Image: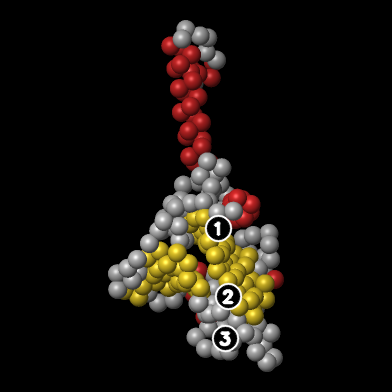
């Protein structure tokens, strides 16, 4: 299987899993390509590619915990991820002496905050230029940005690398135009405002207020 197409829930977005990359395309012609371990040529007949979307609570909680570990306080319990897009490649380019590569990409989103989790289990392709991101937006194609992943020329070593996760071979990256507000920045301001409202309510009701209400 070389191509998987999925219709995302209530969105005019088409997701494609191609040869080592995930392409997300809107209802027009704009698209973003996440090159996880892509090759323009090779023996593809042994490839197994699986793609799906899910809102499974257990999987969402695991993904949220991983992202909050690498990017603290990104997702809150009040605004958790609502959907995962999962692409899995097995025996990628396996042929002859090449044992093939096994890797996975999970796109995690709640509709406003989006992150990616790349997991490399086995890598049997040497070129570092096979990982990165490119886009085709408003009829303008951007060149591949190879800096999305921190492998440099060591992509073969990705499965054993400790990056920004406690799971070897795992790299977590942001897919947001601007850094999202963290839970801590939002929750602290909400907590202060709620405390202020509580103090005002007690004063209106003629109740004693703690000294901290006067700070």
Q: Nearer the viewer, residue 170 or 20?
A: 20
| Residue 171 percent across, percent down from the top left | 59, 64
Q: Which residue is mark 2?
A: 49
Q: Which residue is mark 1?
A: 54
- Residue 131 seen anywhere in this rendered image of the structure: no
| Residue 164 percent across, percent down from the top left | 62, 60
Tell me the SS state at disc 1. Answer: strand
Asked if labels 3 and 2 touch by Cβ distance under 8 angstroms, the answer is no
| Residue 104 percent across, percent down from the top left | 60, 69
Residue at position x 47%, y 71% from top? 5
Q: Most extreme residue toward the bottom, as rendered?
A: 96
Whichever of callouts 3 and 1 sits on the residue coming sooner in the sequence is 3
**Marking on residue 44:** 3
Asked if labels 1 and 3 touch by Cβ distance under 8 angstroms, the answer is no
Residue at position x 53%, y 47% from top? 80
Q: Most extreme residue toward the left, as rendered?
A: 138
Near mark 2 (Cα within 10 A), the count class, few <14, some 14-19 or many ≥20, is many
**Quadrant in the rendering for residue 122:** bottom right
Tell me the SS state at disc 3. Answer: loop
């Amino acid at each position: 299987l070389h191509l998987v197409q999925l219709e995302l829930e209530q969105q005019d977005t088409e997701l494609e899993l191609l040869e080592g990359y995930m392409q997300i395309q809107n209802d027009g012609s704009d698209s973003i390509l996440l090159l996880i371990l892509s090759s323009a040529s090779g023996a593809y007949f042994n490839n197994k590619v699986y793609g799906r979307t899910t809102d499974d609570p257990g999987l969402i909680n695991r993904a949220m915990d991983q992202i909050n570990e690498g990017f603290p306080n990104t997702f809150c319990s009040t605004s958790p991820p609502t959907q995962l897009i999962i692409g899995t490649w097995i025996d990628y380019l396996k042929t002859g002496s090449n044992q093939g590569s096994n890797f996975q990409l999970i796109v995690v989103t709640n509709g406003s905050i989006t992150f990616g989790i790349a997991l490399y289990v086995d890598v049997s392709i040497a070129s570092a230029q096979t990982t990165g991101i490119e886009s085709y937006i408003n009829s303008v194609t951007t060149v591949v940005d190879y800096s999305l992943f921190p492998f440099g020329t060591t992509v073969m070593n990705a499965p054993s690398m400790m990056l920004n996760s406690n799971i070897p071979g795992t790299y977590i990256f942001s897919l947001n135009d601007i850094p999202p507000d963290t839970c801590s920045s939002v929750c602290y301001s909400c907590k202060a405002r709620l405390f202020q409202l509580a103090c005002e309510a007690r004063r209106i009701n003629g109740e004693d207020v703690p000294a901290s209400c006067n700070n």
